[in-house]
Amino acid sequence: MQVSVNGHAAWGDVGPDSPHGSPPIVLYRRVGEGYCYDAFQSEELRQRLSEKDGESVKVEYNIFTEFGKEYSYNVRSIDGLLLNNAQGTVRQYEQFGGEILANDGSSARAVKGCR
């Protein structure tokens, strides 16, 4: 996934900033005509990724299913830094994410296949 440590992604600013004024760290990828993203507030993560701003980094997810249906996920690791294991959170951070709607000229539609 692409990384931005300044809170600015391909589609514009991703927010909000932290209470201390730090922009979020954004991991994103293009899917069709839209984007999927996860954003974080973590100084440890910011320091680790600061030299990789604008580049691609490896992101691993834990995906949780019940009866074959996905019901939740979390980010296991970013660039080899473990955030969550099967038992829970290893490092403290704030996270938000989602899908940016694409517009093909006629109507907006949700991005498919973000996980």
Image (cartoon, rainbow, N blue to C red):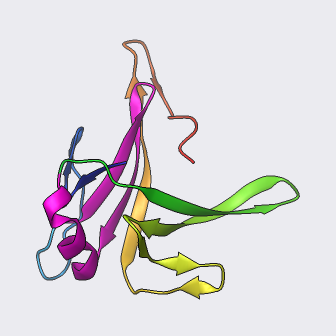
Give the magenta-colored segment's residue range: 24-53
Q: Residue furthest right?
A: 67
What residue sits 40% from the left and 25% below the top?
Answer: 33
Left or right: 50 in relation to 92: left
Residue 72 quadrant? bottom right
Q: Residue furthest top?
A: 106
The quadrant in which residue 38 appears is bottom left
**Residue that appears at 57% across and 48% down:** 115
Vertical placement of residue 98 versus 24, above or below: above
In the image shown, does 101 or 66 lie closer to the viewer? Answer: 66
In this view, the residue farthest toward the left is: 21
Q: Is residue 52 magenta?
A: yes
Query: Which residue is painted at 32% across and 69% down in the image?
Result: 40
Q: Residue 63 location in percent, x, y? A: 65, 61
Q: Is residue 102 magenta?
A: no
In x, y percent, where is residue 108? Answer: 44, 25
Asked whether, in this view, residue 18 is left or right of residue 26, the answer is left
Can the viewer see residue 6? no
> Percent from the top left, x then y, of residue 17?
19, 69
> In this image, 49 relative to 79: left or right?
left
Spot occupied by residue 42 in the image (x, y as percentages of width and height): 28, 78
Q: Is residue 39 above or below residue 100?
A: below
